[in-house]
Image (cartoon, rainbow, N blue to C red):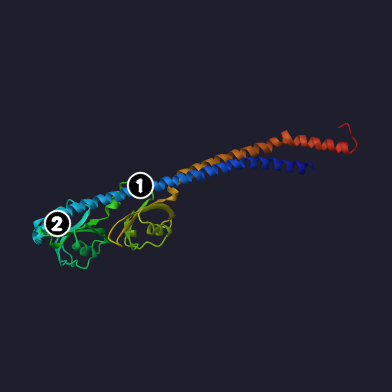
Amino acid sequence: MPILHSSSLRVRLLLFIFVCFLPTFGLILYGAATERQEDAFKAKENALRLARMSAGNHQQIIQSAQQLLTTLSHLPIVQSADQSSCSNIFAGLIQDLTHYSNIAAATADGTVFCTAQPPQLQTTINNKVWFKQALRGPRFIIGPYHLDENSKKATVTLALGVHDEQGVTRGVVYAEIDLTWLNRFAADAALPPGTTVTLRDGRGTILTRYPDAAQWVGKVVPQTPIVNAMLNKQGEGTGEGMGMDKQPRLFAFIRLRGEPGGDADLSIGIPTKVAFSEVEHLLAHNLRVLTIVVLITLALAWLGSDFFVLRRVRGLLHATKRISSGDFTS
């Protein structure tokens, strides 16, 4: 019986000591949760800042293209539809313009008479929405973001009407911007490991993807919570969800404007295991240290309880037995 009583008391003492450590465990977990929220906010903000920077670069390219097309639309060789001279000049221009996949011009009936690249089988563009829009007025047109059928590169078409001195529409001059510059931008941006940069058109088709472009370009993005958030928001935003590669990610996205129904969405996804690696490492370290402290404390309590507590308890039990047997001198 003394052994049972002593054992029970020792276990209760150890359990009491362990319970005293529970608030410390809770404090560590609460601190880690708070740090995780802060890290998530910082990661999303950094991703959104990079998305805005990419969109800003894209806007600068479009503005430069607008200035270029405005200048080209006033050239006499474009006004007069001089095929040979125009194509030679455009071909020389595109060699120094790395963001352009083609510069071309067409007459008012849609016949392409000037192109920097060798002409393809299609020599008319009168069925293009952006061409019809450019013919109707002086407004600069941003066409749809799409995959080029011939080069399989992501492009966006920019167009501007050509008008003579009397205001008569002579045709359209247009440029195709090669959007794979986003991959080069992402490669030079020192992104966190595993970060993805994806550009998708309004129908969900992937136009560019960093990294592993060959694996993803041309595929249709499935309807995931993050994609739905991109579709529901009109400008930009952040979120957290499962990526196309089935990896949990923190996302930031921004919309690139095109013709109605021809917008594109640029998204940047950072793996949560990368974004939270520091706080999770610190949490694991703190839990390991606290666990070691608890184990050492319990071991010392187990060894010291016999000397400081149980020996005295056994003395009290022995005295109690003597008193119960009539030995009141105890």
User: Of helix, strand and loop, which one carries label 2?
Assistant: helix
Residue that sits furthest to the right in the current view = 326
Judge left or right: residue 50 versus residue 169. right
Identify the residue at image location x=69%, y=35%.
Answer: 304
For disc 2, the neighbor class at 10 Å (few under 14, some 14 to 19, many from 20) is many
Residue with the mark numbered 1: 49
Quadrant in which residue 167 is drawn: bottom left
Quadrant in which residue 148 is drawn: bottom left
Q: How many marks?
A: 2
- Could you tell me which quadrant the C terminus lies in? top right
Residue with the mark numbered 2: 73
Looking at the rendered structure, the kind of residue marked 2 is Ser
Task: Measuring from the top left, give residue 169's x and y in whole percent.
Answer: 14, 62
Query: Is residue 66 in sight in this rendering?
Result: yes
Looking at the rendered structure, the kind of residue marked 1 is Arg
CB atoms of marks 2 and 1 within 8 Å:
no
